[in-house]
Image: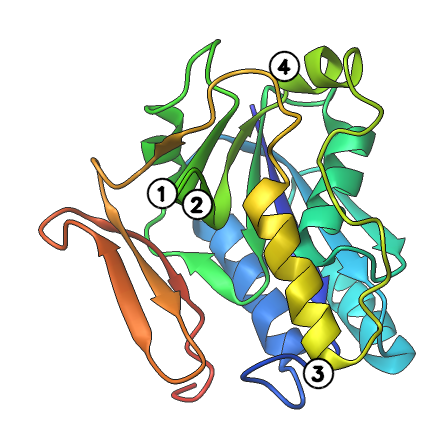
Amino acid sequence: MVNYIVSCYSGKRRGYDPTPIEFFVIKHLDYIKSSTSNITKVTFVINESNNELDNLIIDIINKNDLNIPTIIIRRDNIDGSYGAWEAALLETYKDTKYSFLIEDDYIPSRPDTIDYFLKQINVNVAFVSSLWRENHSSISNGLFNNAMVEKTLSKHQHLFMLNRTSNNTEQTKHYSSLFQNQRRYLSNIEGIKNIDITTVGYTIFKTPNSTINYGNENLPLLIQPIDYESK
């Protein structure tokens, strides 16, 4: 039913230098093994940066037997996680009903996290994000309705609205480009997309200097940053 899609990047990023990409990937592999949700396919998308580390995480993924069909997509580092997710959706959308999109440094907090997203989706809902605010998916980890791919492509040249530029640039331009992508990447998508999980759970979001909780903290914690420092 669900394709678990992880966007991976081993290069320098805000908050990590170097990025502990091996640790992140192993955490996702462990989570997939423990999940009670109906994950029937796994896709790791590698936005290329460091060939040595990229090859290492490919080796780690290939050596883990998930007993679930698993593919690896290796691509140029264009448009960050949004570009990675789009590439994966275009290649795999016919294989499952839904796709769970997540960045490598975040992890579901519960074995049944995806079930909470599934309860928020229906045939008219295109995407359930972790947080919808100011008319965009402010925290973009979430569940995509694969039925919307062909509906969107029939009207638009691309699935997502993205800058279509390389992110191997100076850091200020890099984050400016990603911010633009975040604000508008779902703009082409047919169907309802102003849905999030704040009515059924909450999410912890990592800033450069702290973490912020979004949603009702009396409800279940569904997604959080991977805690590398206390490993």
Q: Nearer the viewer, mark 1 or mark 4?
A: 4
User: Tag 2 or tag 3, which sits nearer the N-term?
Assistant: 3
Q: CA distance from mark 2 to mark 1?
A: 8 Å
Q: Which three-letter amino acid code belongs to the residue tagged 3?
A: Lys
Q: Which three-letter amino acid code belongs to the residue tagged 1?
A: Thr
Label 3: few (<14), some or many (≥20) within 10 Å? some
Helix, strand or loop status at disc 3? loop
User: Tag 1 or tag 3, which sits nearer the N-term?
Assistant: 3
**Quadrant showing the N terminus:** top right
Colour convention: rainbow
Q: Which three-letter amino acid code belongs to the residue tagged 4?
A: Ala
Give the residue furthest to the left.
Answer: 218
**What residue is pinned by disc 1?**
113
Residue shown at 86%/62% (left/top)?
Answer: 166
x then y, percent, for residue 212: 28, 68
User: Tag 4 or tag 2, which sits nearer the N-term?
Assistant: 2
Q: CA distance from mark 3 to mark 1?
A: 29 Å
Helix, strand or loop status at disc 4? loop
Q: Is residue 54 above or below residue 123?
A: below
Q: Nearer the viewer, mark 2 or mark 1?
A: 1
**What residue is pinned by disc 2?**
35
Asked whether 68 or 221 is in front, the reply is 221
